[in-house]
Each structure stands twice: as structure tokens, then as C-alpha cells.
Amino acid sequence: MTDERDAELDADLLVVGGGIAGLVSAWTAAEAGRRVTVLESAGHVGGPVAAHVLAGLEMDAGTESFATRGGRVEPLLAELGLADRVVEPNPVGAWVGYRYQGRFAASRLPRTGMLGIPGDLDEHGTAYGELVEAIGAEGARAARRDLTLPPTVGVDATDPGATTLGALVEARMGRAVIDRLVAPVAGGIYSGDPYEMPVESVAHGLLSALVEVGTLSDAVRHLQAQRAPGSAVRGLVGGMHMLTDRLRDRIVAAGGRILLHREVDGIERTAEGWRVRVAAVGDRPSSGSPMSPGVCDPGSQTCHTASQLVLATTADPALRLLELSEAGPWAHPAAVALVTLVVDDARLDVEPRGTGMLVTADAPDVQAKAMTHASAKWRWIADAAASGHPGRHVLRLSYGRAGQPSTMTDDELCAQAVRDVRVLTDVDIADRAVAATAVHRWLNVQPSARADEIRQRVDAAAANLGDLAVVGSWRSGTGLASVLPYAREQTLRLLGHPDRPRNGTSGASTADTTYEEVAK
């Protein structure tokens, strides 16, 4: 890996974007014996699958788990020699926070659900008791209406694809399920409003399952059955950032190059393959007008050439590079600030809010949209934190929703996070108990109302150009369980070695809706 500004390398495969999707693509090609170059605009690879060290603890700075649905991540981890590090989280579960009678209230999140939608409405079951605890007896009775309604209720009759998550759930299960369960969970995943989220963009297959099985709760159970046995998420001892480290090392060991500070501002199809223009460091990308002959000299220091190309950027740069701006803009990503606190307070030993909490936008006295009690969720973090410091805990709080980025400075965010922890945990943590703080800022992919249409335009353009694959969370669906296998399969297709879908799954876009993985 290098950030030299004068390197220029012809390759078999160029990967534009060194996030986790781009790294998987590069690793797949390098392991197949291809000469690979990765061009990354930032000074590090992996995107939010990254590490930081705080109070002597090495932890994830962003993504901290992966969803088990489909069983598609662990085979890739095994290939990378990480199988022995896979662990399940504390099964105690999470909580939700919301406004109730003008005050902040909290309750346990029922564990038999998806995106907060209950998957078990049996009045005599344990899950129903959890539902009553969360939304009250009246709210639970309203949710059971789902069992008596035809599958068409809540679905947009004119355009089923336009059906929003909020409209569907409210029509079938009532406002209590929305306000206390779906709103905080959907907000924690996508930082947005469930009434603005197309169902198929956040829970792919839920509408078709509803038609097949007849009720929304049964449809949730139907999709849940596709995940691996055990916890809905798993992590890695040492942190998910070890995935980034291992991919980087394997790419370089196979002869690949990873070039940092390379901001691509144009691509051109040539008779030999692809020519990629790299802007000078600090330059802004061009408006996206077609490259003129001679603008990019193949022998210059600002160009890279290869026979095949993978675009692993976010949505807007990919659409611009493909000259598909007329297809319409993707939803602007939400700017999320993640605050990590290391706190010395043994009262947190009892895990007062389980593994964490998701919070509605209108909850009073708190600004965070989510909190993860990391040392309660992961035993390896608890052991590392308590080593030499009994009662030490790690908490992560996230700020910023779609269209409402946090405007606070890092210092202001840290102070707000301490105040919010007191509300969310109901533990009056003293300022002096905060041993260390850190702030990381990430972009969170947002669902698009025209997602399928735009993806079809992208796929058509890629097929027309040839020797091109487009990967990344906006294309495959969010979450590592969607991003990793999709990048792998698309790269193998490009190399002429189609991958066999694992566990009966296909390479189709499937949004991963497990909040623990992507709530930041």
C-alpha cells in the first residue's frame, strides 16, 4: 500500500474505491492471479470498517458486526483465515427509547422481529409478553389485526413498489408499533423516517413474502428463517476492522497495489479496456462531462489503464462516472457522527439497557439516535476494558439523521454524549468518570424511492460497456451480509468465473436490515 503521488501502473483490473466492497473485489481478482490496482481517494482503506485506539483499547471506529442472514459472510471470513475469531454477542438484547406522555421512556425491544415489526403475535407466547411490555396491551391488540387482514391492506394498489415501511406497518399493526418499535429501529439503521422508506429498499422480499404467507408477522418470520441459526449478528474478536486489515494484506501479498489519495474524476472505454483519469490531490471532481480524446494521456502520471474496471464508490460518484446523472439522484447519505466513550462506573455492570438502545427522533431530553453498550454486547471488549480497570465500560452513541446532520463540534458532541448516556442508561455518570472520548464521522446509505429503476439503469450501462462491474452498499443493499457476497460474485462474473450462490441465495440485491450491524 502506498500514497506516492507519481505511481502509475497498468493492471488487469482497476478498482475505483477502497471501501470494503472494493477490497473484496480486489482480493477476489488478486487471488485469481490478476494484476490489480485499487484507487482510493482517502488516506485509508475500508471505509467505516476501520479501527481506532482509545484509552489503550483497540476497537472498531465504525461497523462492529455482520448479519448472519443468508449465511453468506462467514464462508468469506473463513477463506481469509478469520473463522476462529467469529463470536456471538450477548443475547440479552437491546432497548428502544421514545416519547411517552411528554417524557422519555424506554422498554425492551422484542427479539422476534425485523426492523421493529413483530414476528410473533401469539397471545400465549413469550414474545407477545415482550410486545405488551414494549407497546402496551392496547397496542399489542391493535398489532394482532394483522392476522385478520387480507395481504393487500397497507400495500400501494397503484404502485406496490412505492409502498413505504411506515404506511404498511401502520395500516396492518397500528401506530404503537410504528412509534415505539419501527421508528427507533429504522432510524437507527437508516437515520431516517419510516414513512419515507420504500419497503423493498429496506426489507427486500418482505412484500412478496406478505403475498405468499398472508400476514405481515408471518412474512417477517419467513424472512428470518433465511438467516443462520443463533444470533442475528456476529462479530470478530478484536473487531470487524480485522477484516479490512486481512483483505489489505492479502491483496498486497498477491502482488496487488493499493494507491491512496487518488480521486478519480473520469473513466473512458477504450479498445484495450479502460482508461481512468485521476485528479491531482486536492482537486475537485469534474462535472462529469465525457472525456475528450487526448485529455488523459496513457503515459501520464494522472492516468491508469486496465482491461477491466470495478466501480466501488458511493452512488453519486458512480452515476457521475457512468454519465447516468439523468437517471436521477440517489438519496443523499446521512452524515452520522459516532461518539465513543470509555467510562469508569461499576453501576453499568448490570447492563441497564442490555446491549444498547435505539431512539425515536422526538424522544425528549436526548439527541442521540442510538447507543451501543459495546462492553455489554461483546465479551472481548468487556474483558479488555476491565483488565486493570474494574467497572470500565465502552459506549458508542450516534448522531445525525437524514437531512439533519449534526452541527456540533467534536467537543460539543462528546459533552452531549455524556448527558445522553445519563438519560439512556438511567445512571448519573459523573464527568470525572469519563476516561476518554473519540468522535468519528461516517456517511450512512439512505434508501431511494427509485432504487430499483436506478439500479436497472446502472446494470444496463455496465452490460453495454462490458468489462465493468458496479459494487457497493448502495448497489447491493446495506450491511456486510449484502456488500461482501455481492462484490465477490460480481467480480467473479467479470473474471469469467461465476460464483455459486451460497445456501440457496442469489446475487440479487438484498438490503440487510439487522440494526446492530449498521446503526452507528
Image: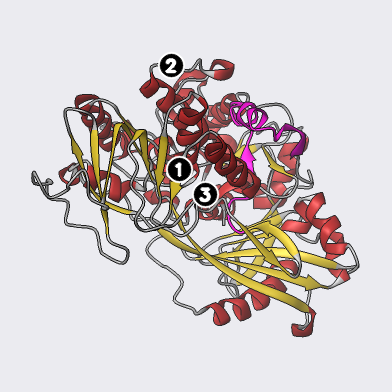
Which amino acid, by three-letter code, is at mark 3? Gly
Residue 75 belongs to magenta span = yes
Q: Are marks 1 and 2 in contact (CB under 8 Å)?
A: no
Q: Nearer the viewer, residue 331 or 113?
A: 331
455 to 267, vertically: above or below: above
Q: CA distance from mark 3 to mark 1?
A: 15 Å
Residue 95 belongs to magenta span = no
9 to 334, vertically: above or below: above
Q: Which mark is residue 257?
A: 1
Q: Please, what secondary structure does the residue beneath circle 1 have? A: strand
Query: What residue sits right under mark 3 in the picture?
Result: 46
Q: Which residues are magenta?
A: 61-86
Quadrant assignment, res 443: bottom left
Say left or right for 212 vs 265.
right
If the image is split into quadrants, where does the C terminus sit?
bottom right
Query: What residue sits right under mark 2 in the picture?
Result: 498
Q: Earlier in the sequence, mark 3 or mark 1?
A: 3
Foreground disc of the pair 3, 1: 1
Which amino acid, by three-letter code, is at mark 2? Pro
